[in-house]
Amino acid sequence: MISEQAKQRMRELAARYPVARSAVMPALYIAQAEEGYVSRAALEAVAEVLNMTVDDVESVATFYTMYYQRPPGKKVIKVCNSISCYLRGCDALIEQLERRLRIKRGETSPDGRYTLLTVECLASCGTAPVLQVNDEFVENLTPELVDRLVDQWEAEFQAEGQSQGRSPAGAGGC
């Protein structure tokens, strides 16, 4: 469910444009930030605020890869597969990630840790192959670097799990 505060932000954005529907992309970002992905309720809220049909909003949300149609994993890994990255071996790196993460491109792991996506361009052709994990870019990828990254992510999840299972120091217990 999209909050009234988010809808108000969308209305304020729409007011900046001569035609309200021009705010559809930033409105979708607001909706996605609120729910983590663009749900049916989000599509309906954006359509209502911008006086568009749900189908028109959905056509924008499904055309662009930056809008998630399903809840993404905690780590969203976007691997560039444009010509520069392709010529520098991104396909083998994608296959390596699929093996290590046990998911195929376009999928989210059952435990909700990872989403693996391929994208057309991450605008870093000079340092190909590249990937983006959440908001962080990793350039000059090699098979060894991919293995180190996955090991690092797994260690982060393990540490996160351990810290959630512990009582704070000094907390009472039997």
Image (cartoon, rainbow, N blue to C red):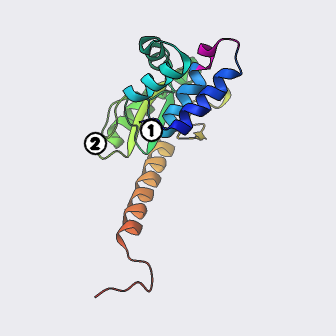
Task: Residue at 59%, 28% (x, y): give it.
Answer: 10
| Image spot of residue 139 (x, y percent) | 60, 37
The residue segment tinted magenta is 18-23
Asked which secondary structure carries label 2, the reply is loop
Using the rendered view, name the quadrant where residue 83 is placed.
top right
Circles 2 and 1: CB atoms closer than 8 Å = no
Q: Residues within 10 Å of mark 2 (few under 14, many from 20)?
A: few
Of the two numbered discs 2 and 1 in the rendering, the one whose residue sits closer to the viewer? 1
Q: In the picture shown, does residue 140 fall above or below 123?
A: below
Left or right of 117, for residue 50? right
Task: Residue at 28%, 42% (x, y): give it.
Answer: 110
Report the quarter where the N terminus lies.
top left
Viewer-nearest residue: 66 or 141: 66
Viewer-nearest residue: 44 or 58: 44
| Image spot of residue 154 (x, y percent) | 40, 54
What residue is disc 1 on? Answer: 35
Q: Amino acid at mark 2?
A: Pro
Left or right of 27, for residue 146? left
Q: In the picture shown, does residue 162 fall above or below 76?
A: below
Q: How many marks?
A: 2
Magenta-highlighted stretch: main secondary structure? helix
N-terminal label among 2 and 1: 1
What residue is disc 2 on? Answer: 110
Q: In the picture shown, does residue 94 fall above or below 109?
A: above
| Image spot of residue 72 (x, y percent) | 40, 37
Q: Amino acid at mark 1?
A: Glu
Q: Is residue 124 visible?
A: no
Report the quarter where the C terminus lies.
bottom left
Viewer-nearest residue: 31 or 4: 4
